[in-house]
Amino acid sequence: MTDCIRLKDSTLDFTKIRKVSYAKGSRIEKFRNGSIIPIINDEMFKTLFSREENIQFPCKLLSYILDFSYEELLEHLHFTKNETGKEKKEEPSYRQDLVVEINGMVINIEMNNNPNEMVRERNLSYLFRLREDRKHKEEYQPVIQVNLNNFCYQGETNTREDFCLSNGKGLIYTEKMMIVDIYLPNIRRKCYNEREELTEMERFLLIGIEENRKKALEYVGDDIVMKEFSENIKRSSEEWDLIEAYDKEWAMKDLGRQEGIREKSEKIANKMLKDDMDIALISKYTGLTEEEILNLKEE
């Protein structure tokens, strides 16, 4: 058995499937007074993009991606249910971050913090579920999956990539399913490279991921919506319930990091024990106490 498809006589090159670069991506740090909560935080993303009173912000973002002006989006875009599946009571439902519609087109925007490659598969499932859920009789609506990724792929330097179903010759199977990947770490990298000029989309997203307010204001320029976006982030970053949710998310991630570090130390300690190395030396190089190492030895 295998977890990937194997084909005979295919023109598809499966060696080109990319791996996530775990070294890149903004980390959620413990909140400090005067700092800004970035949109990579789930609650901040929902506050700024999922509330109808803030519809101008998803419209602004999508104006850089879709062939609609900001004014057209503001007039015709509308929020719809952020849930797919569950046609019957016993069936599970799946919640997306933000689902909107315009002129029969469905767009799902996901804020992806987890660099696990399973996220890619999950987002594909969202795409297909939305396509099935929004079908009108025998006609399928166009569906676009927009991924704001707080990670990028190994060797990838672009800030945006578009994907669709196609064959090895580049012939497109359908124009009704599209994926737009946006790599936030590469936008941050680009902003520190003075030789590269930022696009408006990159400036807009930098306002949302820059934790230093003074630095974030540098990207606003004369754009009214960007200024409003920046002011909204500052105001929301002063709300106690949002700060509490942010610190809770930080604590959970920090706990996961600490557990990962400890698990790695225990693996190293076990290897050193098998080589009959001195317990005091094992403690020195792993950071585990001698008592913890003795407990590992007894297991």
Image (cartoon, rainbow, N blue to C red):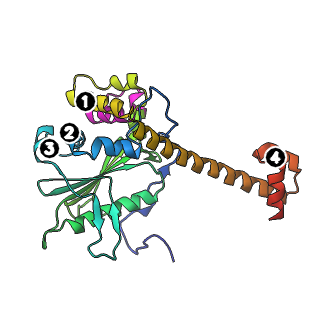
- Residue 38, quarter of picture: top left
In the rendered image, residue 137 lying in the magenta stretch gets the answer no
Local secondary structure at mark 1: helix
Local secondary structure at mark 4: helix
Left or right of residue 288: residue 97: left
Local secondary structure at mark 2: helix
Cα separation, mark 4 vs mark 1, equals: 53 Å
| Tag in front: 4 or 1 | 1
Cα separation, mark 3 vs mark 4, equals: 60 Å
User: What is the crowding at mark 2: few (fewer than 14 residues within 10 Å), some, or many (at least 20)?
Assistant: many
User: What is the crowding at mark 4: few (fewer than 14 residues within 10 Å), some, or many (at least 20)?
Assistant: some
Cα separation, mark 3 vs mark 1, equals: 17 Å
User: What is the crowding at mark 3: few (fewer than 14 residues within 10 Å), some, or many (at least 20)?
Assistant: many
Nearer-N-terminus badge (4/1): 1
| Tag in front: 2 or 3 | 2
User: Magenta region's main secondary structure?
Assistant: helix
Nearer-N-terminus badge (3/4): 3
Instruction: Find the residue positioned furthest to the front.
Output: 240
The answer to whether residue 147 is seen in the rendering is yes
- Tag 1 residue: 228
Which amino acid lies under the numbered mark 4 shown in the image of this protein? Ser
Nearer-N-terminus badge (3/1): 3
In the rendered image, residue 199 lying in the magenta stretch gets the answer yes
Which amino acid lies under the numbered mark 2 shown in the image of this protein? Gln
Nearer-N-terminus badge (2/3): 2
- Tag 2 residue: 56
- Tag 4 residue: 283
Pick whichever, 280 or 171, lies toward us: 280
Cα separation, mark 2 vs mark 3, equals: 9 Å
